Image (cartoon, rainbow, N blue to C red):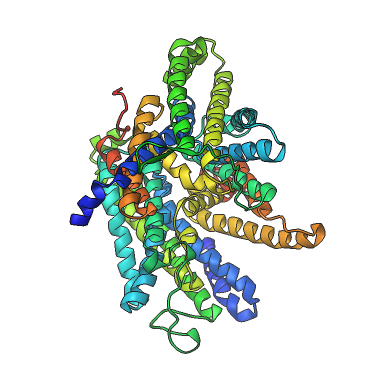
Amino acid sequence: MNRQILMGLGAIALIAVPFIGVPPYWLHIMIVILIWSFAYTGWSVMGRFGLVSLGHGAFMGIGAYGTALLWNHAGMSPWLGIPIAMALAGLFALLVGYPCFKYRIVGHYFALVTLALSEIVRQVIVATRDHTGGSLGYTPEPHGGEGYSIVALQFPEKTHFYLIALGVWMVGLIIWRAVDRSMSRYALEAISEDEDASASVGVEVTKEKLKITVLSAVMTAFAGAMYCQYQMFVSPDTVSGIGISLQIVFAVVAGGIYTRFGPTVGAIITIVLAEVLRINIAELEGLFGFKPAGLDNTIYGIMLVLFIIFLPKGVLGSIQGRLFGRSA
Amino acid sequence: METFFDNLFSVFFIETLLNGLLYGGVLALLSLGLNLIFGVIDVVWICYAELVMLGMYAVYFAHNVYGLPMLPACAVAILAVALLGYILHRVVIAHVLGKAPINQLLATGGVLFFLQSIATLIFGVEFLSVGVSLGSFQITEDIYVSKSQLVAFIIAAVTVLGMYLFLSRSYMGAAIRAISQDREIMILMGVDANRLYGITSAIGGGLAGLAACLLALQFDVHPFVGISFGPLVFMICVMGGLGNLVGGFIAAFVFAQLIATGSYFADLEWGAVLAFCVFVIAMFIRPEGLFARKS
């Protein structure tokens, strides 16, 4: 009971955030954290079962570019465009997932096949530069007076977007919980332990894996579309490719791959860390007289390695493990 | 259709095929070190291409800043990257050896970020060129071949042969092969696995350094140069069958031809897309790699 009250209070507090005069910069950071948390949660619903995909940049790219291209070229409102982009991502996941699972591509091999996927999508975006703007990036056309449009899902006011992102993030957590409580969870855990054994007791290995992969892909595509609608700018390097795929996996592992709030904690850690480093290093410029470009990412990289070596269960996973003595 | 066939039988297409062949040599050399580490230590160095990038900087600094002649500069680069490979193993890989594959992947992924940004920090983002050109020579009236590519091809072929002989004939090679076949029994037999892994990492690093020397002749170096060929090198290793040096060698040429041909008929990016698609399909047909030995 306590837990539910606590969560309710937390939800109310989060909804109240934009109305108590939080500075726009902080609101922006929170929106970014919420959007990425949703993407990370989307990755973790399959990642926790040992299906380590390095290809989620592909789904994110399909979601972001699909929505923006349909809006700019076909005049299709994101209300329709986002579901179509999500369906495309799901189809793509099905197309690649089915042979992957059918032919038993697991472990390193699965990670590298999916890595190829995210590169394929990135290269296609760059290659079709006449339509997508290539490496220079792409902007959905603004619509309506002063950029505010419900049809085009464009909200220059941060409060609106904050509430949307918050809702989406909560839905992400609900999906995570639904997966956690479903029969599929037991099936997938059995599969990740031993595929042959679970197949022999009647688990439909390929089907279970496909279901979770498509769910994960669709969620990630939605996060990509959200990101595009919020930033009003996407480029191949910010929504697809190896960089993003690795970033997703990192954040989830840093936060905790097996717990519901792990991906969110991962998003908070990585985004706040990146911001703090970025701002402090901009200040160092006055001290040194030059800008130490790359210092923020250097520290970021070191911290990631340390995280992986010393906190393999992630921050939240380790804390919960200590507190409740359960092996999360 | 007519233009298609015109394209197909033009001298430029032959030149493309030839360039693809030579490019394959560079890719083969690049994949060699990664393949060795993959096969022996069973860890994917996601940051492998970044080691190559640092090797290219080493060539640049030794040759252009400190004024060493090209060959000693290359030797410096090879030794530097070999040392780097050894350090990487000792500092990072040794701690994640028994862990889940995902953690190993991510640890080296963190190293990737680290190396990229420390290169940005130290060297800046300018494109630096070693500025050594070996020129090119003419085969027929219209077909030119760049000498640096030819040198890369020959060195790659010799190195693959050398590695093969080293692994199959020398005592150390036998030990490395043995530990890659059974990690547990070999330790019981009194083999110091960590020492072997360290040596393998140094050799892998050295091969990355060698590849860096040859790449430095053809491409400018900048902190993000690794991203442009890193993924390709992974695909080659996997398609050749992890740890299968000969398979990797063949796969490198297949990839290079796909990219060269794809870029001839469309853009460079489409060449890469074609190669990656073929890779994905090849994986479905032979999940263990096209040239994997049946176990």
Percent across and percent down for residue B108 are: 54, 39
Tell me what residue is drawn at x 38 percent, y 53 percent.
B269
- Corner quadrant of residue B254: top left
Relative horizontal placement of residue A292, taking residue A257 as reference (left or right): right
In the displayed image of the protein, which residue is found farthest to the bottom? Answer: A145
Q: Residue pushed farthest right?
A: A287
Q: Position of residue B225 (x, y in %)?
A: 53, 47
Above or below, B103 against B193 in this view is below
Along the viewing direction, whichever of A213 and B66 lies nearer the viewer: B66
Disc count in the image? 0
Is residue A80 in view from this perspective? yes
Residue B203 locus on image (x, y percent) = 55, 24
Which residue is found at the position 66% from the left and 31% from the top?
B69
* Residue at 56% across, 30% down: B205
Residue B178, located in which quarter of the rendered image?
Answer: top left
Q: Left or right? Give the position of B3 relative to A327.
A: left
Pick the front one: B200 or A55: B200
Taking the image as drawn, is residue B244 in sight? no
Is residue B113 positioned above or below B93 on the image?
A: below
As displayed, is residue B66 above or below residue B127?
A: above
Find the residue positioned furthest to the left: B1
Q: Is B231 above or below relative to A272?
A: above
- Image quarter (top left, top right, bottom left or bottom right) of the C terminus of chain B: top left
Q: Quadrant of the N terminus of chain B?
A: bottom left
Of residue A38 and residue B285, the one placed in the foreground of this image is B285
Q: Position of residue A143 (x, y in %)?
A: 43, 84
User: In the image, is A139 to the left or to the right of B51?
Assistant: left
